[in-house]
Amino acid sequence: ALTVPIVHEGGTYSLPIAAIKVDYSTPWLLRFERAVISAYESSAWFDYYKDELFGILERRPETLFELNTELLSFFLKKTGIAAEISFTTDFTARDSGEYGKDLRGMIHPKRSNSILKDLELEKPYYQVFSAKHGFIPDLSIMDLLFNEGPEAIVYLKKIMK
């Protein structure tokens, strides 16, 4: 897993994400970049996208919110997903509102994601280590982009049918 360290100030756990600062006092950027290179340098589209991805990190967004927003914008643009990012000012309680259920808690990196199986979102695409490990579902949008490039949108549309 690739993690981003944060500055732990008093009451960090109760701060809104927009106020949580990224901790650049450790060499996590170098470790992050090395991990991504190690995993994806032999993928078909790595060279095409790496400079822009690493450029986001090298700009050192101050807050976790800014970093997340820049990465989200990058991956939306590069995968061809035409989506407008908008932000809320309040939280709507679960199972309410115009769109119904809040499913954010259903997908978690440390739990089995049976909801993905139920929705048939585990269809394989080529992955760098698939010959050795088979298809590994639920990796990341970065995995899909580096392996599928401009075809990522085709894959996403296929699994959403």
Image (spheres, rainbow, N blue to C red):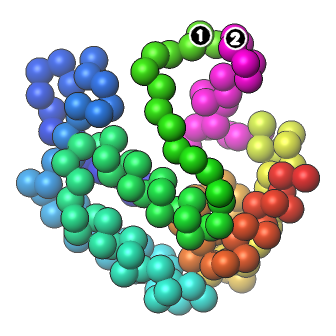
Residue 9, x across and y down, in percent = 11, 28
Which residue is rendered at x = 14% and y = 54% of the image? 24
Q: Is residue 48 left or right of residue 120?
A: left
Q: Main secondary structure of the magenta part?
A: loop
Q: How many marks?
A: 2
Circle 1 residue: 93
Q: Secondary structure at mark 1?
A: loop
Circles 2 and 1 in contact, beta carbons < 8 Å? yes
The question of residue 108 being in magenta is answered with yes
The question of residue 129 being in magenta is answered with no
Which residue is rendered at x = 55% and y = 65% of the image? 77
Circle 2 residue: 96
Residue 31 sits in which quadrant? bottom left
Residue 101, x across and y down, in percent = 72, 20
Vertical arrangement, residue 18 with respect to residue 153, above or below: above
Instruction: Report how far apart the C-alphas of labels 2 and 1 lie in the structure.
Output: 6 Å
Q: Which residues are magenta?
A: 95-114
Q: Secondary structure at mark 2?
A: loop
Vertical arrangement, residue 16 with respect to residue 34, above or below: above
Residue 55 sits in which quadrant? bottom left
Residue neighbourhood size for the residue with mark 2, other residues' Cα within 10 Å, grouped as few (<14), some (14–19), many (≥20) = few
Amino acid tagged 2: Ser
Residue most extreme to the right: 161
Residue 72, x across and y down, in percent = 48, 53
Q: Is residue 31 left or right of residue 99?
A: left
Residue 47, x across and y down, in percent = 47, 88
Amino acid tagged 1: Ala
